[in-house]
Image (tube, rainbow, N blue to C red):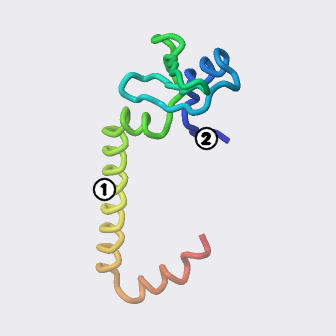
Amino acid sequence: MLTLQPRQRVGHDILLARHGNNISTMRFDRANDRIIAMLDDGSWDSAPNMISPSLEMPETFGSIMRKDWRFLSVACIAMITVAAVAMGISVEMANHMSTTELQALLVNYPAF
């Protein structure tokens, strides 16, 4: 089953390879797209959060919604319109049927 999981940050792996168990805390700097680590001796180190700028990252739910929101909105409106038209047609057909025709339709419908 396909599940959309949060992206793995490359900077964590780079800092762990550099410093191993000497890291006390790590945080993600969104403004610079870097991982910043505080080491046991009080110094700081950072690593970029990408291997290559041309590398395509896996999609997340948020990135899909940002990229395809127009298409999803139009598809949703189209489906609601089709459902409303179908309901309107069925109600109008039921209003124009006589009681005997409607009763025969309702009784025979499960046979199909």
Marks 2 and 1: in contact by CB < 8 Å?
no
In the rendered image, the vertical position of residue 67 relative to residue 13, given as above or below: below
Tell me: 17 left or right of 6: right
Q: Disc 2 marks which residue?
A: 3
Identify which residue is drawn at 37% across, 32% down.
Answer: 67
Q: Residues within 10 Å of mark 1 (few under 14, many from 20)?
A: few
| Quarter of the rendering containing residue 74 | top left
From the top left corner, tell me how far across and down residue 13 is, in percent.
Answer: 63, 21
For mark 1, give the secondary structure: helix
For mark 2, give the secondary structure: loop
From the top left corner, tell me how far across and down residue 16 is, in percent.
Answer: 65, 22
- Does residue 112 appear anywhere in the picture? yes
Identify which residue, 103 or 7, lies in the foreground.
7
- Does residue 56 appear anywhere in the picture? no
Identify which residue is drawn at 43% across, 35% down.
Answer: 64
From the top left corner, tell me how far across and down residue 57 is, in percent.
Answer: 52, 23
| Quarter of the rendering containing residue 24 | top right
Could you tell me how many numbered marks the image carries? 2
Identify which residue, 43 or 6, lies in the foreground.
43
Q: Disc 1 marks which residue?
A: 81
Tell me: 13 left or right of 33: right
From the top left corner, tell me how far across and down residue 60 is, in percent.
Answer: 50, 35
Q: Residues within 10 Å of mark 2 (few under 14, many from 20)?
A: few
Tell me: 3 left or right of 56: right
